[in-house]
Amino acid sequence: MSWYDATTGDHYPDMECTAAGKPGWLDYAEARNCDMTVDINDEQFIFIYLSQR
């Protein structure tokens, strides 16, 4: 659903910050109840998914 690359600053989706102190890509994932986060190299790359239930 959402990802972030700290090396380049790229992220998906390309949204502006919508909540105070929270990046738009993270707010997007949380608003869709994503429940699985993969953190690579201490937040160098972050991938957020919605698992099947």
Image (tube, rainbow, N blue to C red):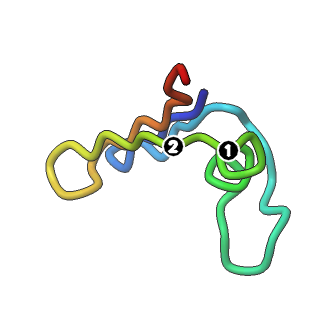
Three-letter amino acid code at the position of disc 1: Asn
Q: Quadrant of residue 37?
A: top left
Instruction: Return the residue found at the far top.
Output: 52
In this picture, residue 35 sits left or right of residue 37:
right
Percent of width and height locating residue 51: 49, 26
In this picture, residue 39 sits left or right of residue 48:
left
Identify the residue at image location x=67%, y=44%.
Answer: 33
Residue that mark 2 sits on: 35
Q: Secondary structure at mark 2?
A: loop
Q: Quadrant of residue 2?
A: top right
Percent of width and height locating residue 48: 48, 37
Q: Which of 38 and 46 lies nearest the eye of the viewer?
A: 38
Q: Which of 47 and 31 lies nearest the eye of the viewer?
A: 31
| Disc sitting over residue 33 in the figure | 1
Three-letter amino acid code at the position of disc 2: Asp
Residue contact at pointers 1 and 2, CB within 8 angstroms: yes
